[in-house]
Amino acid sequence: MPFENTSTRLWKRLSAPDRLAAATHFWKEPPQMAAASALGVLIKARKLRPQAARALPPDQQARILSGVLDPGETVAGFLLVALHLGERRPLLKAFLDALNLPHEDGILKEEADKIEISDESVEAAVRSLSGQFPKDQVEVYLNTLWLQDPERWAVLEKTEVA
């Protein structure tokens, strides 16, 4: 699978149920850096007043946001991360464990930034996911990881998912 080079393009490729899962997890604890932008997306999508958008229950906010194919690059990036921190957390934990990177429930610890990882160990970690998780989910996760740090995860772009 060729990687998408923007979060928005990757977001558009997700199925409707995956986008809803991402948006649902996003609204459970919206990151401060993206919450205002996400509300702006709701306002524009449904032509709502700001107060009305803020007053919507999280499940309605999630349904609206999941239906927007171009929420903007920043919001799309946060939504992709939310997908993996929600329903797909076991996938990212398995990948980080396979790389022996320190994390807390799938969130990398600071010291992980100092650990050098070889291309071979990344390729082996990707192979370890095969059979444990659906191929499309692994591909979306790897693309998301690469989008967050293309320099560190450059090997992912040329790693084949079985």
Image (cartoon, rainbow, N blue to C red):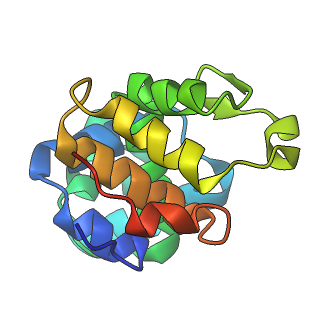
Up/down of 102 relative to 111, above or below:
above
Image coordinates of residue 129 in percent, x first then y, are: 34, 32
Q: Nearer the viewer, residue 140 or 117?
A: 117
**Residue 23 seen in the figure:** yes
Which residue is pictured at 33% across the width and 72% down the height?
Answer: 3
Indicate the quadrant containing the C terminus: top left, top right, bottom left or bottom right. Answer: top left
Up/down of 94 relative to 81, above or below:
above
Q: How many marks?
A: 0
Q: Residue farthest to the left?
A: 16
Image coordinates of residue 56 in percent, x first then y, are: 34, 43
Image coordinates of residue 91 in percent, x first then y, are: 39, 29
Question: Residue 104 appears in which quarter of the rendering?
Answer: top right
Which residue is pictured at 25% across the width and 43% down the height?
Answer: 137
Q: Nearer the viewer, residue 112 or 49?
A: 112
Up/down of 77 relative to 98, above or below:
below
Image coordinates of residue 151 in percent, x first then y, are: 66, 71
Left or right? Give the position of 71 relative to 51: left
Which residue is pictured at 31% across the width and 44% down the height?
Answer: 138
Indicate the quadrant containing the N terminus: top left, top right, bottom left or bottom right. Answer: bottom left
Q: Nearer the viewer, residue 159 or 67?
A: 159
